[in-house]
Amino acid sequence: MLTKRKIIHSACYFAVILLSGCGSLQEKDVDFFTSKSAYDKAAGTFSDNIKGRLYTQYDKWRGVRYRVGGSSKRGIDCSAFVQVTFKTKLGVNLPRTTSLQSRLGNEIKKSELQAGDLVFFRTSSTSRHVGIYLEENKFLHASQSRGVTISKLDNTYWRANYWKSIRI
């Protein structure tokens, strides 16, 4: 049975192979599964690819208004935007609701966030909000006030309501 670590390592390895295309790589005696520097390089390339896909999604959806229960460009809520983005840009099927999405993957520290991780907020005693981490303390989400937008985690509102982060 494949362990989660082996799956991640394999994905990073294949991402490097795919992204290198026809370019020539200098041959080195490196084991991608045990070399920290090779793994870090592969993870960086993989992360850059995810960031690019997320920014492309933002360009297509920027400003689409927020609508509770919405899942189209006529209006979309936060969990539907995350679901659509993961399906169309990352090829990953996620559940429809923030509640179900918050139960997936592994919880990680805020300081460990990488492109594609989910960030969750408690916006009231009964409401939750979800977005997708991009880079440099920024996340992509469907905001009630701004529609699909990019916000900063250190914004006073988001910092005060931060709940947890999940890596799928």
Image: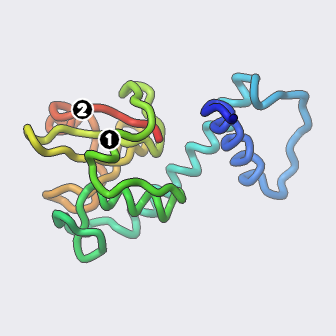
Mark 1 and mark 2: span between their CA atoms? Answer: 10 Å
Tell which tag, 1 or 2, sits nearer the viewer.
1
Tell me, yes or no, whether the two marked residues, 1 and 2, touch with CB atoms within 8 Å. yes
According to the picture, the residue beneath numbered tag 2 turns out to be 163
Q: Give the residue displayed 48% in from the left and 65% down from the top.
A: 88
- Using residue 100 as the reference point, say whether residue 3 is left or right of it: right
Residue type beneath disc 1 = Ser
List x then y, in percent, for residue 22: 84, 58
State which quadrant residue 149 falls in: bottom left
Q: Which mark is residue 102?
A: 1
List x then y, in percent, for residue 118: 37, 42
The single residue placed furthest to the left in the displayed view is 125
Give the quadrant of the N terminus. top right
133 versus 97 height, above or below: above
State which quadrant residue 136 falls in: top left
The residue closer to the viewer here, 132 or 168, is: 168
157 versus 146 height, above or below: above
Q: Give the residue displayed 50% in from the left and 50% down from the top.
A: 51
- Residue 73 visible (yes or no): yes
